[in-house]
Image (cartoon, rainbow, N blue to C red):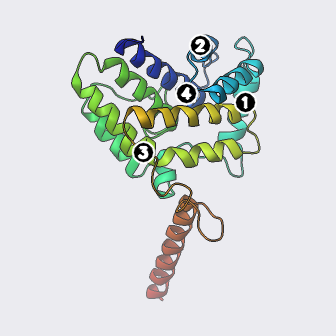
Amino acid sequence: MTSKGEFAAGRGLYYSLFSRFFVFSLSGDRFTGLNAMLGLAAAHALNEESAAAIMHIQAKFDEKNPKNLADEFDDIFHAPPSPLRNSLSYYDEGYEVGHACAKVRKILARTDLRRDEAKFKESEDNVGFVFALMSEFIAREGELELYGELEEQLFKEIINPNIDEFIESLFNHESSEIYKDVAVLLQGFIEFERVVLSAPRPINHGENKKTLDGVSRSEAIRRQKNRVRKIKAMEEENAKK
């Protein structure tokens, strides 16, 4: 029988594993330890699909020469003209550093934890940072009840409502190869966490995420905001004439 501590350690391992895949870094050792983490995850795979995804990642990833993984990361998240957004605010509102980011900052303000800008280049609602934060909260929940509360809040209010669209976009990205299996593994883990934390999949999943013309909800919101800004700018310009 798995003890409570072992169960928490297993969940923390998965969050730490995913943070490695999604945090941008110029460091040459950014993927150091990933093989060991994948091995532990394989030994405690959540289901057959997750076990197969881990096996595929292990077959394609070489920790001693991780260039293919680093290059794929760049092709997905940085290459123009449309890099995949990894800000949860974007999937919530259609633009970055929005309400989701503000919520993460409020959660952080209740702790002694702060974003290390040398290690985490992006904002606090970055997928990789949020996963690293979840791993830290899980590690501390045995010390103070507060961290268990913050862990649940972070998942229910920020991760759960927005992560499905990110995973779907990652899986379908034209440059995804290793990350396609990462997406499969992440989806399986999120479903597991929804059971653990009693947080059902959002009701609007697969319904309100797409508009009638096939544009994602976040993209539709972003376009509408741009239209409003342009109209307002034109009105201000006309008022000056």
Tell me the number on the disc at residue 178.
1
Query: Residue at 51% across / 23% down in the picture?
Result: 14
Query: Residue at 37% across / 38% down in the picture?
Result: 198
Q: x, y percentage for residue 121? A: 51, 33
Q: x, y percentage for residue 25? A: 58, 26
Compare marks 3 and 1 and give the one earlier in the sequence.
Answer: 1
Tell me the number on the disc at residue 200.
3
Compare marks 1 and 4 and give the one earlier in the sequence.
Answer: 4
Compare marks 3 and 4 and give the one earlier in the sequence.
Answer: 4
- Tag 2–tag 3 contact (CB < 8 Å): no
Around disc 2, counting alpha carbons within 10 Å, would you say few (fewer than 14), some (14 to 19), or many (20 or more)? few
Tell me the number on the disc at residue 59.
none
Q: Is residue 96 visible?
A: no
The residue type indicated by label 1 comes to Ile
Compare marks 2 and 4 and give the one earlier in the sequence.
Answer: 4
Secondary element at tag 3: loop
Q: Which residue is mark 2?
A: 43
Estimate the spatial distance between the alpha carbons at disc 1 and disc 2, rounded to whole Å: 20 Å
Estimate the spatial distance between the alpha carbons at disc 3 and disc 4, rounded to whole Å: 21 Å
Around disc 1, counting alpha carbons within 10 Å, would you say few (fewer than 14), some (14 to 19), or many (20 or more)? many
The residue type indicated by label 4 comes to Phe
Query: Residue at 33% across / 35% down in the picture?
Result: 152
Q: Nearer the viewer, mark 1 or mark 2?
A: 2
Q: Which residue is mark 4?
A: 18
Q: Is residue 27 above or below residue 129?
A: above
The residue type indicated by label 3 comes to Pro
Q: Is residue 154 left or right of residue 91?
A: left
